[in-house]
Structure formats: structure tokens, C-alpha cells
Image (tube, helix red, strand yellow):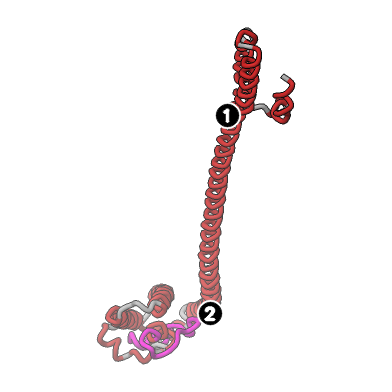
Amino acid sequence: MAEPGRGAEPLWRTPPERLAPPHVYRMAGALGAELRRLSGRFGPEAVAGLVPPVVRLLELLEALVAPVGTEGEARLARLEEQNRQLLGHTARKEREVMLRLKEVVDKQRDELRAQAHEIVCKSRDTEALQEQLHRFMSMNEDLRHKVAVVQAQLKSALEKKSDLEAEGAPSPTEEPQHQDAGRSPAHCCFSKEELQQILQERNELKTNLFLVQEELAYYQRELLNEERVPSFFLDAMKSTIKRQRKKIRAKMLGTTEESATSRAGWMPAGRLGWCDALEGNSPRPRAVSSLPPSRDQRFHVCS
């Protein structure tokens, strides 16, 4: 037993943790060769009882060594499978994170675009409101000036009315003298009630004229500022305004519309500025610059 051991020292000195099935097979071959040598030297009966225990030991050793290699390979396979699963899971996680980040970035970009568009719209609305505010302020200034002029004219008209009423009520002692000497054409034509009615009609006409001027100024601004208004619509508006102007003249003069056209020269330029602005003859007046004809003019016209 010592000689085979000396010839194969590296095999028999292998550490247990490094044993594998090939080592067991080499050990079995060495033991078989040694048993054959002993059988040839001392006869088969000398080794007959030794062969079965040796074979059994080799089988047990093979059974003990074989699972170690199989378990290592299985463990390695499991580790490789886990590694592949972890790599796939990591890749999926990375894709999910990238998709989520992309969605967040797209959403924020859309929100920024919507906010920028909203800012632009609000800035345009602000500019439009500022322009409208300036227009309203200008209209307010014009209206204040017109109201001041109308109040001054109304005050003057009331003073003239009071003077006329005072002149229209003479004392009892002077009444026969006035009857003998004769009255003026105005006093002969109109009584006190008629004068009051004429003044009331005059105030109503002045108010209506002021309202018509304001409405005409509004349509004038809208039409002149609108570039898409067709020319035939402007011509129709001009002709309508001319007819309305003739009617107003005829009503204020107390004559027919045909005769009022021949007397259009008495109307002040300020009264016609709103209509002439559309025709291109003169700019719009800032306020009502004059009144309708005085009472003396009205009286002479009626007489």
C-alpha cells in the first residue's frame, strides 16, 4: 500500500473541498492496480475479502463528491438567472423612469406654452382696454364741454325768457298807449302761451338734435374705423344723413322739406359738422358751438 501511495502523492493529498468525481475515478484506478498486483503476488484469496469494502468506499466517496460540483453549478446557474432578471428589471425601471420624466417634461412644456399664450392674450386685452379707456376719457371730456356749453345756453335762454315775459306784461296805464301806438310784429303774432310753447319746442328740438349728434358721432367713429365696411353702405348712410338733416332743418324752420333746403344757409357749421365729417367736408366739432335761431328770427320767419 505504501508504493502506490508514493507514486501518486499529489492525488492522495488533494484537500477534501477540492475533491471532484475525476479525483475519485483516478483513486479507484490506482487501488485496482494495487489490488491486481497483490493478487498476482499472494494469490486471489489474499485480496478477495478486501475488494468489496474498497468498491463500497469508492462508491460512497463518489456520491459525496458528486453533489458538491452539481450544487455549485446549480448555484451558479441560479446566480446567473438572478443576474439576468436583475438586469432586465433594472432596464425596465430605467425605461419607466425615462418615460415618466418625458411625460413630466412634455406636460410642463405644454403648460408653459399655454401660459405664454394666455399672457399674450391678456396683454392684447389690456391694450384694447387701455385704448377704450382713452376713448372714453376723450368722450367724457367732450361731453363735459358740451354740457357746460348747453348749460350756458340754457341759462341765457332762461334769462331771455324772463326778460321777454317781463316785456310781455305791461302796466295797466301803458296798455292803452301800446294799443294805440301798435305792437311789434312778434307781439302781434304770439301770445304768452304761444311763446312758452315755442320755447318748449325749441328746447325739445335742441335736446333731440344733441342726441342725434351723439348717435351720429358714434356711428361715424365706428364706420370710419372699420376698414371692411363696403362703399355702398357708406353711400347709403350719407344719403340717409342728408335726408335727416333736411327734415331737422324743415322742422326747426317750421317749413316744408323742399323750402328748408333753400334756407340751409342759416344752420351753423357746428350743427352740420357731424354729417359733413362723413362726407369729408369738415372735421367733427368738439361741442355744440351755437344755438338754433333766436326768438326774433323765429318770429320773423313765422310772420
> In front here: 226 or 94?
94
Q: Is residue 166 left or right of residue 193?
A: right
Q: Is residue 162 left or right of residue 236?
A: right
- Residue 271 lies, in percent from the top left, at 42, 84
> In front here: 277 or 153?
277
| Callout 1 amino acid | Ala
For disc 2, the marked residue is 149
Disc number for residue 74: 1
286 falls in the magenta region: yes
Q: Quadrant of residue 187?
A: bottom left
| Callout 2 amino acid | Val
198 falls in the magenta region: no
Circle nearer the N terminus (2, 1): 1
Badge nearest the viewer, 2 or 1: 1
- Residue 184 lies, in percent from the top left, at 40, 88
> In front here: 172 or 140?
140
Disc number for residue 53: none
Dot 1: what SS? helix
Is 276 located above or below residue 96 in the figure?
below
Magenta span: 277-303
Dot 2: what SS? helix
**Marks 2/1: CA–CA distance:** 111 Å
Visible residue check, residue 172: no
In the rendered view of the protein, which quadrant contains the C terminus?
A: bottom left
Identify which residue is drawn at 38% across, 86% down: 276
- Residue 78 lies, in percent from the top left, at 57, 31
User: How many C-alpha atoms fall within 10 Å of the one at disc 2: few (<14), some, or many (≥20)?
Assistant: some
Is 256 located above or below residue 68 in the figure?
below
Identify which residue is drawn at 62% across, 29% down: 72
Visible residue check, residue 278: yes
